[in-house]
Image (spheres, rainbow, N blue to C red):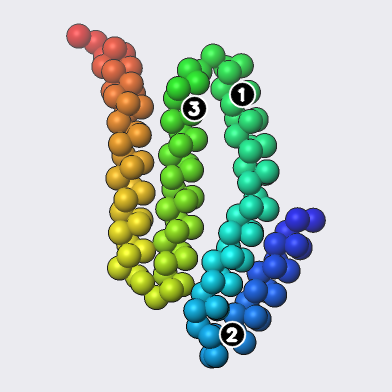
Amino acid sequence: MEIIQIVGIGILATVLILVLKEQKPVFAFLLTTAAGILIFLFLIGKIGTILGTLERVAESSGMEMIHIKTVFKIIGISYIAEFGAQIVRDAGQESIASKIELAGKVLIMVLAVPIISIIIETVMKLLPA
């Protein structure tokens, strides 16, 4: 029933933010950021469980751990970039949010190059010469 706690935090933070926004917009933004971080902290344990399960499945299938760890890093970058961009958007800085998203995409591509190379090599081996 963690979702009830998460929704409760979200609703409580929203009400407080709406009250503070008129008088103290800086505090409203800080409360927005704190609520987002608190909700994220609620989910870290669940994310760890998912990653552990996927790691065990990858090990039992004989998949190289370097590849699965790279995929985990890619997923992490995407979540962190999205989270950061949303916080910056909440502050009204759409341009900076777009740059954060772009940086996340570039970093994902950098990490994906070795995996893409392996896929291309595998396909080339399967094709008749």
Which of disc 1 and disc 3 is earlier in sequence?
1
Where is residue 86 drawn, in percent x and y?
46, 64
Q: Residues within 10 Å of mark 2 (few under 14, many from 20)?
A: some
Badge 1 is on which residue?
57
Return the residue nearer the eye: 97 or 27.
Answer: 27
Q: Please, is residue 79 above or below residue 109 in the view?
A: below
Q: Please, is residue 35 above or below residue 92 in the view?
A: above
Residue at 56% across / 22% down in the picture? 58
Badge 2 is on which residue?
20
Find out whether the residues at labels 2 and 1 contact each other: C-beta distance under 8 Å. Answer: no
Find out whether the residues at labels 3 and 2 contact each other: C-beta distance under 8 Å. Answer: no
- Left or right of 2 on screen, residue 28: left
Q: Nearer the viewer, mark 2 or mark 1?
A: 2
- Separation of marks 3 and 2 at Cα, in angstroms: 44 Å
Badge 3 is on which residue?
68
Question: Where does the C terminus fall, quadrant-wise?
Answer: top left
Q: Amino acid at mark 1?
A: Val
Give the residue furthest to the bottom.
22
Residue 108: quarter of image: top left
Residue at 62% across / 87% down in the picture? 19
Q: Amino acid at mark 2?
A: Leu
Residue 94: quarter of image: bottom left
Instruction: Evaluate whether residue 27 shows in this view.
Output: yes
Residue at 36% across / 64% down in the picture? 97
Residue at 53% across / 85% down in the picture? 24
Which of disc 1 and disc 2 is earlier in sequence?
2
Q: Residues within 10 Å of mark 3 (few under 14, many from 20)?
A: some
Does dot 1 land on a helix, a strand or a loop? helix
Q: Nearer the viewer, mark 3 or mark 2?
A: 2
Where is residue 67 drawn, in percent x and y?
44, 25
Give the residue furthest to the right.
1
